[in-house]
Image: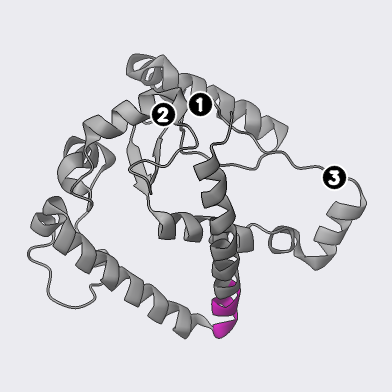
Amino acid sequence: MAWTEEALAAGMAMSARTLAAVLDVVWMRRAGADRIERRQRDRLGAMVDHARSASPFYRELYRDLPAGTPDLSSLPVVTKPHLMEHFDDVVTDRTVTRAEADGFLADPGNIGRPFHGSYLVARSSGTSGHPGVFLLDERARVLGTAIPRVRGSLTHWFGPEGALRFLLTGRRSALVAWTEEALAASMAMSARTLAGVLDVVWMGRAGADRIERRQRDRLG
C-alpha cells in the first residue's frame, strides 16, 4: 500500500500528539483511582452532552436522562445492527452519510486516506453476522493509540524482569495487517491464536448462513 503525502503528514503530526497522550495516561495511572474516576466521569458527561446536541438518534434515545453526568448503567443499551440501521441519524457530523462511507470503503485507493478530510473510517469483519462501519476522529485515534501503548507495553505484560528476558533472549513479536480493505482490527497473538483469527476472518466472509451452521455444529 502506498502512503499518500497527506497520510504521512497526518501520521507525523499524530506522533507528537500520541506521545503527549501517552505521557498523560502514564501520569493518570500514577494519580490514583479517584483521579481516574473523575476523568472518566468528566469524559462520559462530555460525550453524552455532545451526543445529545449533535445526533438526532441519541437526542431521542437520551431524552429522559436527567441533566448532568449520568451513571454509565443508566444509559440505554444499543446494538450494532440498530446503530447501523440508523447510521445517518447516529453520527454527530451531519455531513456524513452511510452511503458515502460505504462508497469510500469500496475503493481500495482510499486506504490510508482520511474520510471527509479528518476521519479514519473502517469496517468490522462481520463475524457476528452484522458488519459495522465506524468513524474515528483525531482525538479517538490518539487515545486509541496511546492507551494500548501503555497497557500493552512489554513491562505491563511481563513486568520489568520479564520484558528484559524477552529482549535478551531474542524472542519476536509480529504485526498482522489486512491490506485488502479498511478492516477495524488490531492484534498481537501466538501462532495458534493467529490460526483461529484467520478462521474467524474467513467465516466472516463466508456469510451469515455459514456462520449459523458453524454455531449449530459447535452447540451440538
Tell me: 206 left or right of 102: right
Percent from the top left, x then y, of residue 139? 42, 60
Q: Residues within 10 Å of mark 2 (few under 14, many from 20)?
A: some
Span colored in magenta: 26-31
Q: Residues within 10 Å of mark 3 (few under 14, many from 20)?
A: few
Q: Is residue 148 above or below residue 123?
A: below
Q: Are marks 1 and 3 in contact (CB under 8 Å)?
A: no
Residue of label 3: 171
Label the magenta part by its dominant secondary structure.
helix
Percent from the top left, x then y, of residue 161? 84, 65
- Check the picture and name the quadrant holding the N terminus: top right
Q: Which of pointers 1 and 3 indicates the residue nearer the eye? A: 3
Real-space Cα separation, disc 2 to disc 1, in angstroms: 7 Å
Residue of label 1: 200
Q: Amino acid at mark 2?
A: Thr
Q: Secondary structure at mark 1?
A: helix
Residue at 25%, 43% (x, y): give it.
79
Nearer to me, 197 or 109: 109
Determine which of the numbered discs, if any, sits on residue 127 in the image.
2
Q: Are marks 2 and 1 in contact (CB under 8 Å)?
A: yes
Q: Is residue 106 above or below residue 93?
A: above
- N-terminal of the pair, mark 3 or mark 2, is 2
The extreme front residue here reads 5
Residue at 30%, 34% (x, y): give it.
101
Q: Amino acid at mark 1?
A: Val
Q: Quadrant of residue 70?
A: bottom left
